[in-house]
């Protein structure tokens, strides 16, 4: 396989960033580590939401359902089933995916904009239900017992490093997973659905099955991220676990601002989001107003977001997805 | 007796929910457009009434004289200037733009009015009630229900008997060719939003008299409105009233079992109906 | 006769797909012109361009001397171009009478009102309160034509009036054409039935793959000429 110059630059750049990030615990202080962990899981959530909305036409405002489920499952599995944290973490994801199955069966009865609100209702049902479970603290929530926290690793800094690497690994797995998915037959099918669902069905794409699988898969990964989030926070309440503001509004803003329908967009959006937050978080609700205005402005003026703005000709790419037939490519170059 | 009372209160509350739902249903019917900021606009109507009560000393219900035309005009202009740009085949922009508006509006209200819970007093009306046997029916809930019936009846008459109403129904059927009828689709869309906003104003002011509200009270109203629309069946205004009543009764019964179950009971009845009868109870009949 | 419509080099696109190529077309006031061609030749696309349902910004469609290319559909309707669209496109939730009344929303005065349309197609009075799409195909076609007439158009576009209808019903509908023409309304009709098209029109155009392949006075045409233009036989010979 030939590697072009652009490819080698790209690979070089990515390797430097990756090595730098994976060495995080050796160069970053605690505050930076915390910030990076948060950035990792927000980016992972953003990529997953983008896979739903940007690539599959499934616009959900109820992904907090799966963040919360993952979080609560982690607490349940460690506290009541006595499982070690490192096992409970992936298991929480898998169980969330299983619970997403009936959820999807209900939500898929609604289409388009009503699907969005339907997912939100379902997330509320989960929130209100967990508030009724007294063994998990009911409405006021519960903390992860210290012996479980201690069992993860020796000492706080070792535990924090471990959390950091898990967050980084999940984020990379999500990005690479979506990239691989987009380069596969599934990606082609999803693209066809996004462009024209009826036509996709008529050429043999099994649209409902494909969308269903994507929804459940995304839910499972979202659940695992939720487990990680509340492993880091060490305390869970229904309000925090199923927060529409944290796990839907902010995630959607990140994707919209960065650029929906690309892998690079959410990365850009996530960086911008954390930079803005550093400067504007003191403004309180004005910070949310500013984010809202930017998002609405982008949707109205350049729906492909900042990445689309920077990259009008689609010449730049960190993650090449587009398929080009070599023959077509040469034809294109010949015609002026 | 308590149970019958809970059911009667639920029915009357359903009137308010039908008012929440009517605007959402109307906009979806005409332009296949769902405003995710719908609930926040209801709350904005309530805060508008609060402002007028505090500054002019108006009776809460009288504030409608100002709140209703202001919101209708805002709806018309907002549709022409902003929302018409995102109405279309691709639903993503409309969902994301109105979702953004929801967040902006909530936080603007939070800045302006603080997170405190508010409620408007309608004076003697608050405590007035009628006794039927051992049932006691409050004047405010009854007024709400009456308003809902009047608004839905008025809308039904408008759609059935005016030229603009016919044009809106035709747009709902087949908006693409409405231009052949010499009608500007952008104007019709804005009329639909203005009508929906007028209903939102009524719903907002009545809600302010009936219950506590605060800047974050919008999203749950959106969910109630949505549930009433889906339970009733898309595109049917009277179905919306039935949907509102079913939701209200479900919540009333839930609250009777345990106050913490009020909202959850409504959601669960909604989900059951969605699974058992996804087209809703009274779907629009098409010829 | 004065000119009603003059079009030069009209192109039309659906996204990246070009459906019409440099169409030149003329029509006089009160003339009846038939447009024929195979499926996908661009006939309906052409009518959509004239009514403004398909964007034509920046091109030239002169209607009574004014360029209406890029003008929104509702304004073109108000200037007097009406269409009975392909597939009739009646509004299902409206009754027959309500469908007809919507045509009057265009707001042009003239000989056509509800009574005149009901006199032209008496069945529409009898069925006035029935949802329009519950009528038979032929009756639905009458509603669609009546709805277009209610706007008192100077130019009436009829797209595939006979599609899916029994010959006897087609004849009934075409029997109304002379009455429509007496008011001075020009008619441009898209028709699959070449015989019918030749019989009722003054002039004809034939489209083939988005190009004008033949045009002329209908009385001078032969079926051979038309079928050559229709199917592009010389192409097949190559």
Image: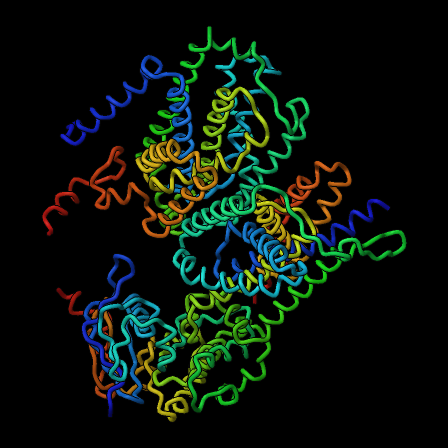
Q: Quadrant of the N terminus of chain C?
A: bottom left
Locate residue B20 relative to residue A288 in the image: left or right. Answer: right
- Indicate whether C50 appears above or below A298: below
Residue placed at 59% from the left, 75% from the top? Answer: B161
Task: Pick whichever, A307 or C81, lies toward us.
Answer: A307
Q: Position of residue C211 (x, y in %)?
A: 21, 70
Tell me which residue sits at (58%, 64%) in the image. Answer: B66
Front residue of this view, candidates B211 and C35: B211
B80 left or right, relative to A123: left
Quadrant where the C terminus of chain C is found in the figure: bottom left
Q: Quadrant of residue A95?
A: top right
Estimate the x, y position of residue A85 in percent, counting from the top left: 51, 14
B218 left or right of C199? Answer: right
Q: Horizontal and vertical percent for residue A30?
A: 40, 17
Q: Is residue A204 visible?
A: no
In the rendered structure, the answer to whether residue A312 lies left or right of residue A202 reads left
Q: Toward which corner of the image does residue A310 lie, by quadrant?
A: top left
């Amino acid at each position: 396989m030939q590697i072009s110059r652009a490819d080698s630059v790209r690979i070089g750049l990515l390797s430097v960033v990756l090595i730098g990030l994976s060495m995080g615990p050796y160069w970053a202080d605690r505050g930076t580590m915390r910030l990076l962990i948060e950035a990792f899981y927000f980016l992972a959530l953003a990529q997953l939401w983008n896979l739903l909305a940007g690539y599959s036409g499934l616009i959900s405002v109820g992904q907090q359902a799966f963040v919360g489920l993952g979080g609560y499952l982690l607490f349940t599995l460690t506290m009541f089933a006595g499982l070690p944290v490192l096992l409970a973490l992936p298991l929480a994801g898998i169980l969330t995916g299983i619970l997403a199955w009936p959820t999807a069966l209900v939500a898929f009865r609604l289409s388009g904009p009503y699907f969005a609100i339907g997912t939100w209702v379902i997330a509320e049902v989960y929130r209100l239900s967990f508030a009724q479970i007294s063994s998990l603290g009911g409405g006021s929530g519960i903390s992860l017992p210290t012996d479980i926290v201690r069992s993860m690793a020796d000492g706080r800094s070792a535990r924090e490093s471990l959390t950091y690497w898990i967050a980084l690994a999940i984020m990379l797995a999500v990005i690479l997973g979506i990239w691989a998915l987009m380069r596969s037959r599934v990606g082609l099918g999803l693209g066809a659905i996004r462009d024209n669902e009826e036509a996709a069905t008529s050429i043999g794409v099994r649209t409902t099955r494909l969308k269903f699988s994507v929804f459940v898969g995304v839910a499972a990964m979202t659940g695992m991220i939720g487990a990680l989030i509340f492993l880091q926070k060490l305390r869970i309440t229904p309000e925090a676990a199923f927060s529409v503001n944290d796990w839907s509004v902010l995630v959607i803003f990140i994707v919209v601002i960065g650029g929906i329908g690309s892998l690079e967009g959410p990365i850009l959006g996530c960086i911008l989001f954390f930079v803005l937050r550093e400067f504007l978080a003191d403004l309180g609700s004005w910070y949310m107003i500013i984010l809202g205005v930017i998002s609405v402005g982008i949707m109205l003026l350049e729906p492909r977001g900042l990445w689309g703005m920077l990259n009008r000709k689609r010449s730049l790419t960190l993650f090449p997805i587009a398929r080009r037939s070599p023959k077509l490519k040469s034809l294109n170059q010949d015609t002026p | 007796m308590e149970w019958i009372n809970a059911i009667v209160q639920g029915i009357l509350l359903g009137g308010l929910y039908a008012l929440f739902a009517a605007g959402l249903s109307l906009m979806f019917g005409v332009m296949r457009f769902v405003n995710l900021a719908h609930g926040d606009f209801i709350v904005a109507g309530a805060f508008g009434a609060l402002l007028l009560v505090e500054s002019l000393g108006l009776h809460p219900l009288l504030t409608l004289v100002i709140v209703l035309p202001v919101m209708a005009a805002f709806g018309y202009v907002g549709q022409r200037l902003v929302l018409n740009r995102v109405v279309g085949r691709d639903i993503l922009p409309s969902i994301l733009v109105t979702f953004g508006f929801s967040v902006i509006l909530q936080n603007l209200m939070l800045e302006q009015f603080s997170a405190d819970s508010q409620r408007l007093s309608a004076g003697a009306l608050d405590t007035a009630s009628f006794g039927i046997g051992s049932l006691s029916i409050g004047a405010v809930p009854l007024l709400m229900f009456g308003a809902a019936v009047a608004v839905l009846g008025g809308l039904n008459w408008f759609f059935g008997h005016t030229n603009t109403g016919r044009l809106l129904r035709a747009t709902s059927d087949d908006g693409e060719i409405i231009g052949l009828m010499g009608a500007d689709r952008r104007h019709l869309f804005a009329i639909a939003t203005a009508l929906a906003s007028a209903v939102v104003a009524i719903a907002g002011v009545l809600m302010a008299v009936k219950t506590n509200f605060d800047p974050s009270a919008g999203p749950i109203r959106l969910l109630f409105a949505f549930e009433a629309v889906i339970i009733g069946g898309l595109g049917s205004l009277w179905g919306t009233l039935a949907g509102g009543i079913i939701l209200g009764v479900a919540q009333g019964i839930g609250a009777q079992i345990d106050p913490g179950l009020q909202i959850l009971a409504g959601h669960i009845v909604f989900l059951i109906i969605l699974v058992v009868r996804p087209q809703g109870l009274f779907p629009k009949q098409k010829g | 006769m004065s000119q009603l419509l003059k079009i030069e080099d009209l192109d039309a696109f659906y996204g990246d797909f070009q459906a019409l190529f440099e169409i030149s077309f003329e029509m006089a006031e009160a003339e009846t012109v038939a447009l024929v061609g195979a499926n996908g030749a661009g006939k309906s696309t052409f009518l959509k361009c004239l009514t403004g349902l398909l964007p034509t910004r920046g091109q030239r469609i002169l209607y009574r001397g004014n360029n209406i290319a890029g003008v929104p559909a509702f304004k073109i309707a108000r200037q007097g171009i009406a269409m009975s669209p392909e597939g009739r496109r009646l509004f299902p939730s409206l009754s027959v009478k309500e469908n007809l009344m919507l045509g009057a929303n265009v707001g042009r005065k003239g000989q056509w009102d509800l009574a005149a349309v009901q006199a032209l197609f008496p069945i529409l009075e009898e069925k006035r309160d029935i949802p329009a799409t519950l009528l038979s195909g032929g009756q639905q076609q009458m509603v669609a034509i009546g709805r277009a007439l209610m706007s008192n158009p100077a130019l009436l576009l009829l797209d595939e009036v006979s599609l899916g209808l029994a010959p006897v019903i087609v004849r009934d509908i075409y029997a109304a054409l002379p009455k429509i023409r007496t008011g001075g309304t020009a008619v441009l009709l898209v028709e699959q039935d070449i015989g019918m098209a030749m019989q009722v029109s003054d002039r004809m155009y034939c489209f083939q793959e988005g190009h004008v392949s033949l045009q002329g006075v209908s009385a001078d045409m032969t079926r051979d000429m038309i079928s050559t233009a229709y199917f592009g036989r010389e192409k097949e010979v190559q």
